[in-house]
Amino acid sequence: MRRREFITLIGGAAAAWPLAARAQQPGKLPTIGFLHPASPDANPDRLRAFRLGLRDAGFVESQNVTIEYRWADNQVDRLPELAEELVGRQVSVIIAISYPAALAAKTATAAIPIVFMAAEDPVKQGLVTSLARTGVNFFGAELAPKRLELLRELVPEASRIAVLVDPTNRMSTESTLRDVEAASRKIGLQIQVLNASTSREIDAAFVNFSRKKLDALFIGSATFLMDRRVQLALLAAAHKVPATYPWRDFVEAGGLMSYGASLREAYSQTGMYAGRILKGTKPAELPVMQSTRFELVINAQTARILGLTVPQTLLATADEVIE
């Protein structure tokens, strides 16, 4: 259980920053490149957190820094092209959200510092050579055992669990299934994998869930699924499916329960790191930061719709209960 979700820095470490700095023209605002596999409509709160972190580091968008946004709209194959665009704009630092975005950015440049967030261990995936050198990390899919434990506490009769993953996000899918399968064996749960990488496939997955008479649903941490959180919450309610989600955004959209690190905090930390790089801090000088905040959020109204009684033990330990 030591694989983590990371925000960290890549791109040539200390040697890379002077190259980027010298490319900055006097009198011109520094520019941040922001590369994301999803769409802006699904991420307003996280963008706000990123800008707050950037402000804490002394930078305000359109005042003393420019941000060039590139959104792939859940078309992961567009990320390399979008990364090349940011490099062509001679940005000072690239923010890459997700492993595919980080890989695209790393492939596109060796001279521009990259701050990335991803659910996979960046050392094992070859993005960086050492965690001791730079960055921020926070727990991600490794929380699968805890999420399954909480789901079973809420739905004790559940024995057959569906796991919904996005097969186009290979790294997220592999890590999620590895962790869930290992954890489920220890507590005697049976796992059924459901795949979805489009809205229609999400609809089909719920039909499949009902046909196979499964008991509960475990939602993976893929960016696409995060983008479709409203659809997932509505379908879960319509099909009377108790589900556990990786982040609170799902529960705020009507999902039943989530447990995970605060991604808003992570986006804020990413903004602070970007600001420190713009001020001249070398990537190699930035220590690895680890998230210490984990949130259990329960939607009591959704529980009532599903006919579930939330145990007092869960209510007492929840960070937030949405009524």
Image: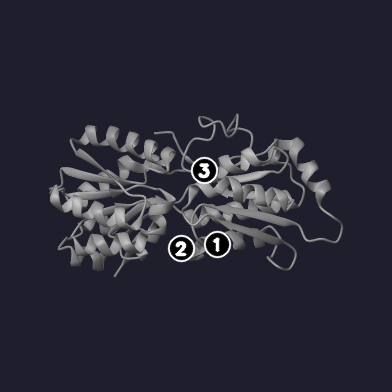
Query: In the image shown, does 54 or 178 lie closer to the viewer?
Result: 178
Give the answer, above or below, for where 2 lies relative to 156. Answer: above
CA gap, disc 3 to disc 2?
A: 18 Å
- The part of the image, by quadrant, that contains residue 55 is bottom right
Q: Is residue 221 visible?
A: yes
Disc number placed over residue 47 in the picture, else none: 1
| Mark 3 vs 2, N-terminal side | 2
Looking at the image, is mark 3 or mark 1 earlier in the sequence?
Answer: 1
Say what amino acid the circle numbered 3 marks: Pro
Quadrant in which the N terminus appears? top left
Horizontal and vertical percent for residue 53? 61, 58
Determine if residue 294 is in view: no
Q: Which residue is mark 2?
A: 42
The first of marks 1 and 2 along the sequence is 2
Drawn side of residue 288 relative to residue 260, left or right: right
Residue 230 lies, in percent from the top left, at 35, 64
Q: Residue furthest bottom?
A: 323
**Callout 1 touching callout 2 (CB < 8 Å):** no
* Secondary element at image label 1: helix
Camera-near label (1 vs 2) is 2
Q: Residues within 10 Å of mark 1 (few under 14, many from 20)?
A: some
Mark 3 sits on what residue?
Answer: 100
Residue 124, label in figure: none
Identify the secondary structure beneath mark 2.
helix
Residue found at x 55% / y 62%: 47
Q: Amino acid at mark 2?
A: Ala
